[in-house]
Image: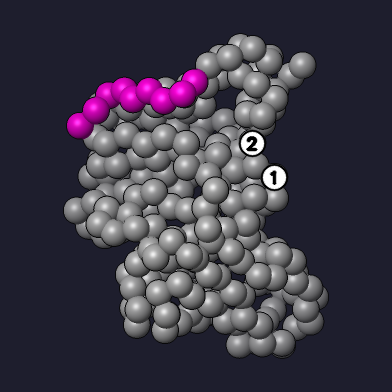
Amino acid sequence: EADIYQTPRYLVIGTGKKITLECSQTMGHDKMYWYQQDPGMELHLIHYSYGVNSTEKGDLSSESTVSRIRTEHFPLTLESARPSHTSQYLCASSARPGGEKLFFGSGTQLSVL
Amino acid sequence: GESVGLHLPTLSVQEGDNSIINCAYSNSASDYFIWYKQESGKGPQFIIDIRSNMDKRQGQRVTVLLNKTVKHLSLQIAATQPGDSAVYFCAEKNSGRDDKIIFGKGTRLHILP
């Protein structure tokens, strides 16, 4: 069982609100990722981090931002949520070197009204 | 551009039969491939992986086959069980370029009683 946790599990908010999706892992992994996934569809990488103070944008353009101040914590923030942000957000981590085996959290299902 | 995809969005298999899930990839530089299983309401879970210097790798009830000539990947599940019901994703990585793992669209596996 992977030790990576995401909160909240579900979130329904109004347009224009600022939100932060939390992700924490207790495995000491250096690499962490955020993926966006629509139901039954592929995962799109939106942000990743190689370690503390490292953040990179993924392949899918996103209006979200991330921070990595501590190894175990990789929060994702939306400054002003819109209905187009409605989706599932999955956080993952992996060890280095290599880092191919991703451990995923259970996801946050975000609905913006 | 790079893309990883699956041939069929849905596959129905009789319980006890073998399942074969297929995946085509377009990036000939990819050197590492992974299969993930995603059950409803959960994040993807690692099943099995294979490097490009191999053609076949076996796990417990699962086998991954890699055909680099036609850029094709398959996952075989022996004696399919109800617990195998899930969406299956193939993913690929080009280790020489970056650490990003690209996911395909997913195949939903239905187990018929």
Question: A97 or B10, which lies in front?
Answer: A97
The residue that appears at 32% across and 70% down in the rendered structure is A50
Colour scheme shown: one colour
Give the SS element for disc 1. Answer: loop
In 3D space, how far apart are the residues under numbered discs 2 and 1 (Cα atoms)?
7 Å
Whole-percent x, y for residue A24 in the image:
53, 70
The residue that appears at 43% across and 52% down in the rendered structure is A102
Q: Amino acid at mark 2?
A: Ala
Magenta stretch encompasses residue A50: no
Q: Is residue A47 above or below residue B26?
A: below
- Relative side of A27 to B45, left or right: left
Res A96 visible: yes
Q: Residues within 10 Å of mark 1 (few under 14, many from 20)?
A: few
Whole-percent x, y for residue A78 in the image:
60, 82
The residue stretch that appears in magenta: B53-61
The residue that appears at 42% across and 80% down in the rendered structure is A70
Question: B113 or A95, which lies in front?
Answer: A95
**Which chain does the numbered disc 1 sit on?**
B
Q: Amino acid at mark 1?
A: Ser
Q: Which mark is residue A25?
A: none
Residues at discs 2 and 1 in contact (Cβ within 8 Å): yes
Magenta stretch encompasses residue B54: yes
Q: Main secondary structure of the magenta part?
A: loop
Res B25 visible: no
Residue beneath label 2, please?
B86
Whole-percent x, y for residue B41 in the image:
70, 50
- Relative side of A58 to B42, left or right: left
The residue that appears at 71% across and 65% down in the rendered structure is A9
Residue beneath label 1, please?
B40
